[in-house]
Image: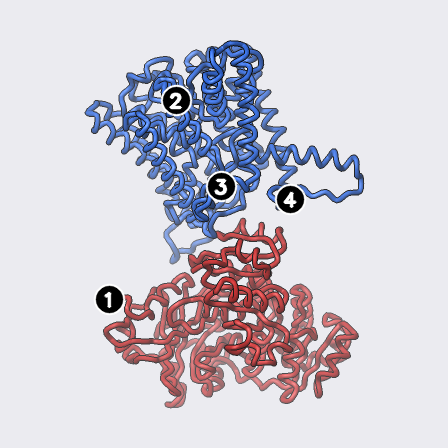
Chain colours: A blue, B red
């Protein structure tokens, strides 16, 4: 757009002006997330004000500095810009989110550790570098960690779209770049802003009811709120070193399992169920049914060996430990009541593998998403049928609706890249001195935003080298942005005009 | 407002674009997933794929709580049936259908209260035909739009060297006109940019000047701006589709009409329908045919096939061969801007007319008519002032006292049968039809607010 003298004041004209404006704006809004921990700090009369004030001012000023030169830009976000903003935003926020952790100087003494913790929080991974001493951390810091999870859960950009209507149509490009799942065009409401608002409303309502249930089941208010935020976002940060095991309360564990599954369910389903006031919505949905099926099948495969190998004395205990760990890993939450590393036979590996395939599209969970798995299997069946009936016209359907072929191809592409990246990164992690199984579990934990790994990495990642931590930071972002959104920015074609 | 649009064709998608920008909840239904995907990428709307008249598809599109249904699919039958279904099953308050076929339109009883539940039926072909007809009526006009049932007209002309007003200030306009003739210049486009006219604005040659005046005064005023144009005597039409046929029927009694149609069967049909017009079977872009039929003596050449590119090329060719004035029907808005700078005198966009008609209906309050001026950059609006000085922001006030949105001017007022050209001290009374111009399209909402009654109590 060309402005001549009497038009608007000289607006910034470079091609990323819109990206710059929005990134700056979002940073300024994000700086406000330093306020709730300050409140918590005041409530408990502790003394960690400085780190959060640093976080607030540094983020606010940087945001303003980025935004100011581009404030007059009226250019709309193009599809390409949407990817860039999303990647920039997750990356940049991860860095700025690390500021309070770094300056707190309580458990994170290096820049790498603080960034790892911050990205792990935002991407709802839940891996921590704190080896021991979560219980002794100031309340504000533990709250801040849970809060990182919570904002990252449904998506910080979805939140921005909900509260910043001026993103307009550009908001949709961002939305699509951030939302997980193969079919992103299905909007709940005609306008993207009200769709985002609906998602957040459901998210807030679920989190609030979760916190209430936890509190009723015996957690104190602080733990209930922190754990509710970490559960619905399928994050996994706990305020205790022993995680949920700290409470050793059967009913609480059941509640955690239910809410982890709710977090790993497509939020569009929650929306429909709420609008139609009916739970049938869930059972009509192929993805949800498959998710439950996988949980039941894997549950049997996990619990029986535990019982028969004598890991736990009773069948009840085996089911309690086995199912909790399966759902915690599967939904990519990563809470723990036991360490599965020493469990018999194939069980530890199966539990890590479940992280790839339990969470649904449009949920807060990670992994390849159940719907992709369904499409992948149906595509395989279709290929088999095609061999039997070479001239048959075969349509792939989910829930009675035809799935376009390009979606199916995209799913195959996604699978191969996802598996490829997992293998590649496993080898990279092995160079840092981990054994193959541990390395694989670390990469799976990061790329699926799952959290705990196996072996030495079950409770904490403190022992991983700095290089290994950066690899995992990359893998976490890769998983949260579903590979392509992140990878596309590294292709030369993306930067060509 | 929750609006469902059936059909993602030219009209449907342009309409969706306009409505989505004005902050409505828009859902578009179409059978073609490709069209929908393209639309969804560009606009903040929801799309539903399926047959537009199926109840289940309508339900998925949110018909249960929709405020308005606009059916603009290719098929008249689908459009009318969808309105019927929306009425019976979903009690949709407002239903609009595009109906093209003259066979339906002829039967007025069909659309009466006890007939089909269609609140407004729109025939784009008829709108375009009327539009071209008016242009031919005023040779030299670029755009003619009616307000208050034609009592007031807005006319756009290109100022020429030799016009009396060219090179003078606008405030001199009244001194050139007889006392009883009044006009008001609403907008001036200079080199493609709209400007708000002031008293000391000097009209330059090649400016596009939009003025508003009572219908009977228009030819006099046009003479001020350009040399007197000869009345149109010979018209040539390229394309014998619905629009071509209607135009020929409307014109053949007053002027000499030649109509070129490529398809032999259709040409035969045309000749059966028309009495005095000459039907030529051939290609509208065939140089020899045009020469043979004395294109150089032709006053107006109108390309009205349904192919944009063919229209543009044949119009350009006709202009080069000597046609006095060439018009071309163009669906794609991008092309409209492209050609209006060049050889083609007037580009007519069928969507623009249809959308003006639809938008007037969709917009709330007492806005009865909205016309996009050339290229849709500015709008002319007809609004009715209701209420009394206490409840309305316009009634009982002098024009200079009204807080108009930026870039808006009041051009004229129609009071009963009288046309009053607006002055700064004209007082607006209740039930006046006020005609305004808006340089910035996004201010339409402010105009709606201005004319809504009672809001300022709050």
Distance between mark 4 and mark 3 Cα atoms: 24 Å
Image point (63%, 28%), residue name: A416
Q: Is disc 4 placed on a helix, strand or loop? A: loop
Distance between mark 3 and mark 1 Cα atoms: 43 Å
Distance between mark 2 and mark 3 Cα atoms: 45 Å
Image depth: mark 3 or mark 1 in front: 1
The mark that comes first in sequence, 2 or 3, is 3
Image depth: mark 2 or mark 4 in front: 2
* Pointer 1 residue: B457
Distance between mark 2 and mark 4 Cα atoms: 45 Å
Which chain does the residue under circle 1 lie in? B
Q: Answer with the quarter of the image where residue B180 lies.
A: bottom left
* Pointer 2 residue: A250
Tell me where residue B305 appears, x and y as whole percent.
67, 70
Relative to A403, is B398 on the left or the right? left
Relative to A33, is A179 on the left or the right? right
């Amino acid at each position: 757009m060309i402005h001549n003298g009497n038009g608007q004041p000289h607006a910034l004209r470079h091609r990323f002006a819109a990206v710059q404006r929005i990134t700056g704006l979002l940073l300024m809004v994000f700086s406000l997330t330093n306020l709730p921990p300050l409140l918590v700090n005041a409530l408990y009369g502790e003394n960690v004000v400085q780190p959060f004030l640093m976080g607030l001012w540094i983020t606010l000023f940087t945001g303003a500095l980025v935004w100011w030169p581009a404030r007059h830009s009226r250019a709309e976000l193009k599809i390409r810009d949407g990817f860039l903003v999303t990647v920039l935003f997750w990356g940049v926020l991860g860095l700025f989110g690390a500021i309070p952790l770094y300056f707190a100087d309580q458990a994170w003494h290096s820049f790498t550790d603080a960034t790892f913790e911050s990205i792990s929080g935002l991407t709802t991974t839940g891996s921590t570098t704190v080896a021991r001493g979560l219980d002794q951390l100031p309340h504000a810091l533990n709250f801040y960690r849970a809060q990182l999870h919570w904002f990252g859960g449904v998506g910080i950009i979805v939140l921005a779209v909900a509260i910043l209507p001026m993103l307009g149509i550009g908001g949709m490009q961002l939305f699509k770049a951030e939302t997980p799942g193969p079919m992103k065009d299905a909007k709940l409401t005609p306008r993207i802003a009200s769709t985002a608002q609906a998602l957040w409303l459901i998210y807030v309502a679920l989190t609030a009811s979760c916190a209430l249930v936890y509190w009723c089941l015996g957690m104190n208010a602080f733990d209930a709120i922190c754990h509710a935020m970490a559960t619905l976002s399928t994050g996994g940060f706990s305020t205790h070193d022993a995680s949920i095991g700290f409470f050793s309360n059967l009913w609480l564990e059941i509640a955690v399992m239910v809410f982890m599954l709710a977090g790993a369910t497509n939020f569009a389903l929650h929306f429909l169920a709420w609008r139609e006031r009916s739970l049938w919505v869930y059972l009509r949905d192929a993805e949800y049914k498959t998710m439950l099926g996988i949980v039941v099948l894997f549950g049997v495969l996990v619990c029986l060996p535990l019982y028969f190998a004598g890991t736990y004395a009773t069948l009840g205990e085996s089911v309690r430990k086995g199912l909790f760990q399966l759902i915690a890993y599967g939904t990519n939450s990563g809470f723990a009541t036991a360490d599965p590393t020493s469990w018999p036979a194939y069980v530890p590996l199966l539990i890590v593998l479940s992280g790839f395939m339990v969470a649904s599209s449009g949920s807060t969970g990670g992994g390849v998403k159940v719907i992709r798995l369904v499409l992948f299997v149906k595509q395989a069946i279709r290929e088999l049928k095609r061999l039997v009936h070479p001239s048959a016209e075969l349509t792939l359907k989910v829930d009675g609706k035809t799935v376009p072929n390009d979606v199916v191809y995209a799913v195959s592409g996604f699978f191969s890249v996802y598996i490829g990246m997992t293998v590649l990164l496993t080898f990279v992690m092995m160079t840092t001195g981990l054994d193959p199984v541990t390395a694989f579990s670390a990469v799976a934990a990061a790329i699926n935003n799952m959290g705990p790994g196996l072996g030495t990495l079950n409770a904490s990642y403190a022992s991983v080298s700095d290089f290994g931590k950066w690899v995992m930071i990359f893998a976490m972002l890769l998983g949260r942005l579903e590979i392509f959104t992140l990878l596309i920015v590294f292709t030369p074609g993306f930067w060509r005009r | 407002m929750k609006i469902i649009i059936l059909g993602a064709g030219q009209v449907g998608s342009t309409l969706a674009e306009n409505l989505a920008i004005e902050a409505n909840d828009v859902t578009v239904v179409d059978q073609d997933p490709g069209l929908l995907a393209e639309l969804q990428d560009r606009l903040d709307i929801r799309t539903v794929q399926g047959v537009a008249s199926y109840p289940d598809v309508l339900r998925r599109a949110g018909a249960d709580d929709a405020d308005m249904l606009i059916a603009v699919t290719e098929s008249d039958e689908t459009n009318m049936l969808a309105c019927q279904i929306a009425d019976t099953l979903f009690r949709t308050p407002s239903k609009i259908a595009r109906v093209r076929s003259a066979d339906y339109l002829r039967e007025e009883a069909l659309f009466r209260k006890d007939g089909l539940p269609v609140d407004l039926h729109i025939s784009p072909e008829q709108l375009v035909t009327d539009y071209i007809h008016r242009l031919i009526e005023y040779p030299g006009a670029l755009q003619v739009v009616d307000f208050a049932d034609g009592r007031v007209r807005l006319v756009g002309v290109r100022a020429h060297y030799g016009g009396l007003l060219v090179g003078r200030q606008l405030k001199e306009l009244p001194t050139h006109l007889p006392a009883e003739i009044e006009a008001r210049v609403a907008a001036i486009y200079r080199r493609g940019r709209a400007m708000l006219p002031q008293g000391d604005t000097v009209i330059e040659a090649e400016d596009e000047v939009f003025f508003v005046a009572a219908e009977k005064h228009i030819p006099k005023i046009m003479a001020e701006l350009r040399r007197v144009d000869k009345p149109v005597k010979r018209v040539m039409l390229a394309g014998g589709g619905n629009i071509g046929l209607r135009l020929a029927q409307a014109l053949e009694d007053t002027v000499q009409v030649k109509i070129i149609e490529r398809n032999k069967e259709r040409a035969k049909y045309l000749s059966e329908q028309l009495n005095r017009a000459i039907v030529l079977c051939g290609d509208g872009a065939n140089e020899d045919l045009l020469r043979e039929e004395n294109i150089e003596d032709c006053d107006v050449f109108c390309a009205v096939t349904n192919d944009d590119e063919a229209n543009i090329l044949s119009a350009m060719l006709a202009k080069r061969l000597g046609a006095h004035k060439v018009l071309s029907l163009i669906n794609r808005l991008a092309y409209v801007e492209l050609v209006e700078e060049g050889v083609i005198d007037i580009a007519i966009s069928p969507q623009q007319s249809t959308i003006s008609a639809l938008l007037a209906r969709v917009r709330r309050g007492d806005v009865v008519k909205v016309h996009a001026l050339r290229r849709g950059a500015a709008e002319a609006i007809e609004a009715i002032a209701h209420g009394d000085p206490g409840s309305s922001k316009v009634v009982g006030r002098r024009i200079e006292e009204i807080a108009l949105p930026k870039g808006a001017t009041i051009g004229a007022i129609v009071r009963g049968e009288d046309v009053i050209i607006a002055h700064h001290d004209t007082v607006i009374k209740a039930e006046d039809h006020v005609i305004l111009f808006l340089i910035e399209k996004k201010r339409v909402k402010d105009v709606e607010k201005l004319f809504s009654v009672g809001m300022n109590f709050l």
